[in-house]
Amino acid sequence: MSLAILISVFVGGLVLGIPVAITLGLASAAYLLSADLPLVVMPQKMYAGMDVFVLLCIPGFILAGNLMNNGGITERIIRFANALVGWVRGGLGLTNVAGSMLFGGISGTAVADAASIGGVMIPGMKKAGYPASFSAALTAASSTVGPIIPPSVPMIIVGALSGISVGRMFLAGAVPGILMGLAMMLTTYLIAVRKGYPRQPWRGLTELGKSFLGAFWAIAMTVLIIGGLLSGIATPTETAVVASVYALVVGLFIYRELNFKQLPAIVIDSAVSSAAILALVGFANVFAWILVSERIPQLISSAVLEVTDNKFLVILLINLLLLFVGMFMETIAALIILFVPLLTLAQSVGVDPLHFATLAVLNLMIGLTTPPVGVCLFICANIAKLPLTPVVKAIAPFLLTNILVLLLVSYIPALSTWLPSVFFD
C-alpha cells in the first residue's frame, strides 16, 4: 500500500509538472506517513546523501563556468569554431557543434551550454538562412555533448554514488563525447548538402590563428582541470577551486570583460544553481533509500535475469529503460534512483562498472533532448521562439545519430575504458 502511494504521488507530480526535486520530496513524505515511519528520516537521509566530499566540486565547477561565460568565453569559442569549420557547407551548423564541444569542457552542464551557445548561434543561424527549427534542434542536440566531455556534473554524481574515481569518469567520457560531436557534425553536413544550406567564406589562416589565441585561455581551462586530476596533484574539489580562481583571473585581467560589480550576482547565481542540484540529490537519496528498503533493485534484477542473462540483451534492456526514464525524469534524479540497482544488474552479467557508468550518463544526456521533459529542447525552442513540435521533428536525425553512438559505446567497452586505463593503470 505504501509503495503504491509512493509511486502514485511521484507519477502524479511529474504529470502535473511539479519540479522533480519537490515531487521526490512529496512522494517520500507520503510514503513515510503511510508506512507510519518518523518524518525525521527525511532530513537524516537527505544529509547523508549530500554529505559526500566529492560533491563539493559541483559548486566550484558551476562557479568557474559562470565566471568564464560572463567573461566573454562564448563569443570567443564560437569565433574560433567558425574559423575552424565555418567554411564547409552548413558551416554555421558545424560551428554550433564544435562550439558545444569546446564549451562543454568549461561548463560541465548541458543546460548552460544550450542557453549560452543557443543565445548566440540560434539567432545567427536564422539570420544566415537556416530554418529556425533546424537551428534550435541542432543546438539542443549538441548541448548534450557538454556533460560527456570533462568536466561533467553528472559524472561527479556517478563517482559519488559508485566510488569510481572522478578522474576516471572524466576520461571515460572523453572518447564517447568526441564521437558524439563528430557524428553530429557528419549528420549536419549531410543535411546541409541535401537541403543546400549556406557556407561561410574561408577567412584564412590569419583569422584562424587570431581566433585560437582569443579562445586559448578558455580552452586551457579544460587542460588545467584534466591535468590537475591526472597528475594527482589535486582532488576534484581542489581542482574545481583552482578552476574558479583561474576563471576569475582570466575574466578580470586577460579578457577584461568581467568586472568586480558583476561578481556578487555571479556568485549568487552559482550558489542557487548548486543549491538546486544538492537539494535534488538530497530528496532523490531519500527516494532511493525507500526503494532499497522495499527491495525494488533486487526485484528489477530478478525480473530482467528471468527474461535473459545474456550480457548483450541485458545491456540493450538497460539502455531502453534509461532512454525511457530520460524522457520523463531529470538526469541527476534518475542517476541517484536507478544507477546503483542497474549497476548491480550490469555487474551480474560481467559489465565493467566504468563502462556502465559512461553508457548510463550518455543515455540520460540523450533524454535531455526528448519530449515531454527534454529541458534542452524547451530552452532552444524558446530561444528560437517556436512551439515544441517543429523542433522535435527537426531533432529526429540527431537523436538517431546519438543513439547509434550510444550503441557503439554500449557494445565496445574500450571506447570508455581504454583512456582511463592508459593514465591510471
Image: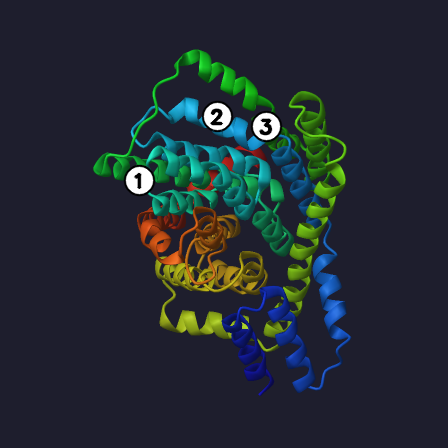
Q: Nearer the viewer, mark 1 or mark 2?
A: 2
Q: Residue furthest left?
A: 194
Snapshot quadrant of residue 89: top left
Residue 408 visible in image: no
Label whose residue precedes the other's in the sequence (1 or 3) = 1
Read off the residue under disc 3.
218
Task: Residue type at mark 1: give it.
Answer: Thr
Mark 1–mark 3 distance (CA, rounded to whole Å): 27 Å
The residue positioned 60% from the left and 70% from the top of the image is 23
Mark 3 burial class by Cα count in 10 Å: few <14, some 14-19, many 20+:
many
Q: Are marks 1 and 3 in contact (CB under 8 Å)?
A: no
Residue at the spot of label 1 = 187
Q: Which mark is residue 306?
A: none
Pick whichever of labels 2 and 3 is earlier in the sequence. 2
**Residue where numbered disc 2 is placed:** 79
122 versus 15 height, above or below: above
> In what quadrant of the picture does the N terminus appear?
bottom right
**SS at circle 1:** helix
Cα–Cα span, label 1 and label 2:
22 Å
Q: Residue at x 54, y 78 (%)?
A: 7
Q: Tell me how far mark 2 sits from mark 3, CA to CA.
A: 12 Å
* Image coords of residue 56 (percent x, y): 72, 47
The quadrant holding residue 247 is top right
